[in-house]
Image (spheres, rainbow, N blue to C red):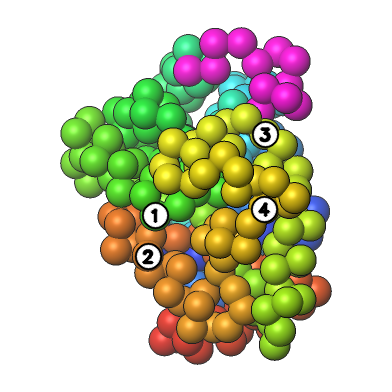
Amino acid sequence: MTDFGTYGVWRGAAELDARFATTVERLGYGALWIGGSPSGDLRIAEELLDATERIVVATGIVNIWKDDAAEVARSVRRIEERHPGRFVVGIGSGHREATAERVRPLASLAAYLDVFDAEGVGRDQRLLAALGDRTLALAAERSLGAHPYLTVPAHTARARRILDETRPGALLAPEQKVVIHADQEEARPIARRYLKRYFGLENYVGALIRHGVAESAFADGGSDELIDLVASNPTVAAAVAGLRAHLDAGADHVSIQALGDDPLASLEQLAEGLGLSA
């Protein structure tokens, strides 16, 4: 099975380049997650792998409504030939608010995986974006595991139970945001600006409410308590604690999304705090 290490980095595809990838690898992170629905040709993944030597690259995630499954499968096979064991394709069904064609997402994910099976993309070469119980179970049954985005440790604990009930040992790799800044009164607004769009999406809000977040916490851009929970801030120590809370709840790997003007500087400080080494 591909070794993601304990900590990775999540970054939107449009903000990734060779310099970012090589720096993340040098800092000792085990994986680089490509967010923002990268294209099904997966050229960005190939470019990042070409630029690095060891780090695992994964998509977080390819949108199943946007890209043909057979095309994505061909891209995965192409990359596997060039960089064996270093790439995992994450897929997901997106958001109801942004995808008019999003109908029967669970069945559509299963059908997408059927194509992967037929095209020779094995279970350990793919994973699923998963929040709900049934999608988590599907992730364990038919893929390497689950990559939940914008969750809390309580969700991680439940996800761990569901994955283990379906297939013990399935990978659980949640995403966690961090904001490292000298002033918490400036760190929280950075997180609020970024999270505003997500707090308008039913699947994320619903999952957070089901795992202990009060509905009132989403008012006015999110309460301080909510912001601090999903975007650990402002110190390295606070960020480390936020990441380790997911590990304590059962995560195998945490993908870190550093918000702010200089994410590489934040990731460098965080790598030191986590005791990472290249």
Q: Does label 3 or label 4 sit earlier along the sequence?
A: 3
Amino acid carrying mark 4 in the image: Gly
The residue indicated by pointer 2 is 245
Residue on which disc 4 sits: 222
Badges 2 and 1: C-beta atoms under 8 Å apart? yes
Write down the quadrant of residue 65 in the picture: top right
- The amino acid marked with disc number 2 is Ala
Q: Is residue 106 above or below residue 9?
A: above
Q: Of the two numbered discs 2 and 3 on the same chain, state the one appearing first in sequence.
A: 3
Q: Amino acid at mark 3?
A: Leu
**Quarter-wise, where is residue 159 in the image?**
top left
Seen at 52% across and 44% down, the residue is 214
Instruction: Give me the C-alpha separation between circle 2 and circle 3.
Output: 24 Å
- Residue 217 as seen in the image, left or right of residue 30: right
Query: Mark 4 vs mark 1: which is more N-terminal?
Result: 1
Residue 155: x, y in percent? 39, 45
Q: In the displayed structure, does residue 143 sit left or right of residue 92? A: left
